[in-house]
Amino acid sequence: MKSIEQLLTKADLHFQRNEYSQAYDCLRIAGQSGHLYAALDYAYHIAPNCPKVAIDYLNALPDNSKPTVRFHCLLISRFYLFEEMNNELVRELVRLASAGHAESLIVLLCWTEQNAPVYAQLQSTLGRYNPNIYRQLFMGDPNYADVSTSLCEDTIITTVLEKQTSLLNKTKTAVDSNSIVCEMSGVLSDIECDYMLLRYKSLLQPSMVLNPLNGNPMKDDIRTSEVAIITNQWVDWISREVEVKMSRMSDTKPQHGEPLNLLRYKDGQEYKPHYDGFTDTQLKQTSIIEEGGQRTHTILAYLNSLSEGATHFPKLGITIYPEKGKLVSFLNVDKNLALEKQSYHCGQPVFTNEKWMLTKWVRSNRTEYGTLVFGSNCK
């Protein structure tokens, strides 16, 4: 039996040679031999097409009772098997949270902000077990007032599922609208907004646009913000939930999405008037065809509230100011997939504050990113 180190070295060599099947087979065996991250890499490799096999693999590991293994089994179940949160998922999250598992606590906090006693109890539990994470999210020292009280599974389940029903009803209203531009307040909780900013801001770099001649990214004065592209190796439970909410509001499939972008505007930065949809010339480019084709929808999420830096649609006379937790969805094309001329828009400049937001572009067909993160079966 080869050692774990030998298996990982062999996997690296296979990856360098683009021998992916052999590389992941080495990771599979290394995971079964006790290397947790090799096991997770293998599980997420097979999860898009075979989620139940991935879960069975993780459950058969020698250390399958570890919180990290249990959490990732839940994550794979949530986003590759189930369309919604359910009793079983939430109950297991509560059990992990009761033992201080940080990721589980953060997931539950994102769903329970509307129930002050439950939210405070989850906050206190996070502060007790993970004070550094607490300080980053809540900008202060933990409050231990509710730590002595055990988490009530049934109350938390009810709170989460009621919140889910409320959001589904909200997004159904947006889907039923025939407007080019739809906006909806209060879709993302405060902690989701704060988490996305804190989690991904270290990835920021100057924003790019696509070269109209060859489709390659390039710098242009039309767009002067900073961007963090949240590719599949960076996504987690919270970012996936954000994407699901965006897809529900826009009546699109998460498998058709590009990677989520975190944006920061400051010091006069802006995105001058433009279209997000591709031109006929761009749609002939191989890179755009292979990665899903036309950008049919754009969805924005504001992570803070401002009285400047509005999203403006000059041809529609619509101006939307940043409001924390608000989602905005608009069509880039008409029913015939031709460029929707009224979708012409801009991100107005910011001078006195920073504007933080998320942008999601959706294609007419499935993308590699969407399939990796949400599976091959459309929900």
Image (tube, helix red, strand yellow):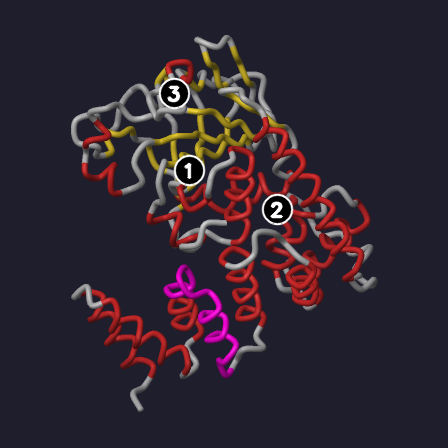
First-in-chain label (3 vs 2)? 2
- Crowd rating for badge 3 (residues with CA inside 10 Å; few <14, some 14–19, many 20+): many
Image x and y of residue 48, in percent: 41, 59
Question: Badge 1 is on which residue?
Answer: 261
Of tags 1 and 2, the one toward the viewer is 1
Which residue: 59% across, 48% down? 136
Q: Element at badge 3?
A: strand
Is there a contact, CB below 8 Å, between mark 3 and mark 1? no
- 20 and 266: which one is in front? 20
Image x and y of residue 238, in percent: 55, 49
First-in-chain label (1 vs 2)? 2
Does residue 179 appear left or right of residue 110 in this picture? left
Give how far apart the Cα atoms at labels 1 and 2 are: 20 Å
Which residue: 44% across, 8% down? 315
- Crowd rating for badge 2 (residues with CA inside 10 Å; few <14, some 14–19, many 20+): some
- 336 and 193: which one is in front? 336
Could you tell me which quadrant the N terminus lies in? bottom left
Q: Element at badge 2?
A: helix
Give how far apart the Cα atoms at labels 3 and 2 are: 29 Å
Query: Three-letter amino acid code at disc 3?
Result: Tyr
Image x and y of residue 278, in percent: 29, 26
The disc at residue 271 is 3
Which residue: 64% across, 43% down? 139
Does residue 55 appear left or right of residue 166 in this picture? left
Query: Three-letter amino acid code at disc 1?
Result: Asn
Question: What's the magenta region?
Answer: 44-62
- Crowd rating for badge 1 (residues with CA inside 10 Å; few <14, some 14–19, many 20+): many
Query: Three-letter amino acid code at disc 2?
Result: Leu
Give how far apart the Cα atoms at labels 3 and 1 are: 14 Å
The disc at residue 137 is 2
Q: Element at badge 1?
A: strand
